[in-house]
Amino acid sequence: MPEDFSHLAALSDRLTRLAWVNAELVRATSLEEVAQVVVTHGADAVGSEVASMTLANPDGVTARLIAINGGRSDDPDVWGTFPLTAKVPSADGINSGRRLQLNKKDLDERYPHVRDRGIESAVVLPLRIGDSTIGTIVLSFLKERALDATEVEFLDILADTCAQGLDRIAAKEEAARQSAKLAFLADTANELTSLDYETTLAKVARLAVPTFADWSAIDLLEDGKLRRLAVAHVDPAKVRMAHELAERYPEDPESEMGAWNVIRTGESQLIPEITDDMLVAGAVDDEHLEIARALHLRSALTVPLVARGRVLGVLTWVTAESERHYTQEDLELAEAVAKRAAVSIDNSELHSQTMAASVQLQKAVLPQTLPVSEAWEVAHLYSPSGRTEVGGDFYDVIELDGDRLVLFVGDVMGRGVDAAAAMAQTRAAVRAYAALDPDPAVVLTRLDQMYARYQGDQLVTLLYAVLDPVGGELLVANAGHPPPLVVRADGEVIQLPFAEGAPLGVGGFERGRISVPFATGDTVIAFTDGLIERRREDITDGQERLARAVPQLVGRRLSRGLPHLVDTVSDPSRDDDVAVIAARRGDLTTAS
């Protein structure tokens, strides 16, 4: 008995530490931070002596080692980048997309070079986003280690949280890039409203440095000659040098490269990499070549300035010190600027670009699919309001043993990246706590404790339910969220009581739960307030409107009925997002 108690205590300690690691991951704000949490704290939590995180490269044929702890000193050099065909656990995990638990025999047969390092067992955790495996976590042990089933479940949650964190960070970075582009185009539009075009274009050239270019120049065609109107660089001395070079070494009008070719053809020119052969070919003399090499030029693009079909000049961006190489995407941005940039970009395009970044960020924190067993029919719907910032609505479904189902939906007050981060944190925390003890009151109490400890700025409401087909009941806890509805198989609508507790983290409330009978054919509908709220209307009116409409779900597949329900109930002119999730017990034999 003492030995069993010692084992249980050690397991409890490891699971507690893994829960904290998951909490650290949802707070991470960079790839490096995620990697260090995994290979240090995550490895310590399970007692792994060697831990690594690897990500697949965009080329689809190679991977790169992001971080390692406990390996050999030359590992970063050897495994910095390696082909996915390499016979190593991390590559096999990426290729298979499955968790691999490797014992000494497995390592001897499949990865002898790993055994040569004294590794006797390992677990490979795939990092999955939707249907794609973006990388792996490999935890290795110097002794044979049989992982407890609960530990394996927690490690799967760790990998899921890590993948979500990476996806969230990538979405946030992409949103930042899109925001920077939009801000640049907006600033350009403001400058181009001036009638003093020379001053205006000089400002436009400066706006591109250093975010998009190390060198930015605008040349206008006047009387058959190119006049360098503006040059921008962070170093004023180099600006003077550029003007002098343009005077001493004017471009050849017959050249098939550069400004004159763009003016003749009216077509943009992209040079992803400026080679030394190009510099030699373009140099007039040895001094010209020496200066060109000293400038450390790396990449360039030149686009035409066009008005009413006439080429007026060119805009040129060049990279040097930043070592950046231009892409087609950069060329398209420069073309938008050259064609009077933000002047030609109307409000609808600005809105669409920002909305695209917002939707991408939303997808990073909302589940794309909700796989459940045949014992349940589940449908979900998320409808953004059309505003340009990501909303705070979130939801998820978790399968438990005994065909039980956890269903939750929540709302972070506010919008934008901070709201998205709070969504991801709360969703991951709910999943982690539900794995420990799915009881609704326990989960909400632990969430209160987490919010009290980390003192988040956002208020979060949450409706959390456990659907138990064996007990024939629905257990619900509510933290300040609109209450769900239950529709019986015969069409009777049960309105659950409004929440007595405050949003998460407010404190001072003892979380309780209610139990509602839930039989075969019954359906529960949970939602955010965007579904029922309307201007100049009490929210109870919206609740009653929903109660009158939900019987239409009886006898219909939820996947078909839910969109129609949302269209019937919600306000078309709303400025709030709508998230709805519904679950029905048992198969429908009369579904239309």
Image: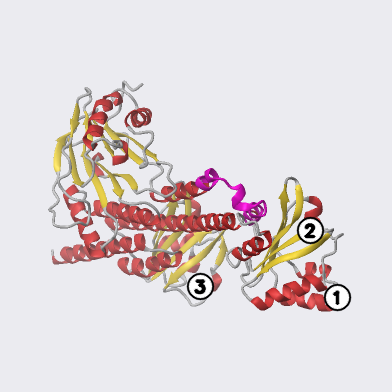
Residue 380 sits inside the magenta stretch: no
- For label 3, the SS is helix
- The image shows residue 35 at horizontal and vertical percentages of 42, 66
Foreground disc of the pair 3, 1: 1
Identity of the residue drawn at 59% across and 52% down: 342
Q: State the residue in front, 190 or 63.
A: 190
Residue 347 sits inside the magenta stretch: yes
Q: Are marks 3 and 1 in contact (CB under 8 Å)?
A: no
Q: CA distance from mark 3 to mark 1?
A: 47 Å
Vertical comparison of 498 with 91: above or below: above
Give the amino acid at mark 3.
Asp
Residue at mark 2: 221
Stretch in magenta: 329-352
- For label 1, the SS is loop
Give the amino acid at mark 2.
Leu
Q: Residues within 10 Å of mark 3 (few under 14, many from 20)?
A: some
Q: Are marks 3 and 2 in contact (CB under 8 Å)?
A: no
Q: State the residue in front, 299 or 416.
A: 416
Q: Residue at the front extreme?
A: 195
Q: CA distance from mark 2 to mark 1?
A: 26 Å
Residue at mark 3: 75
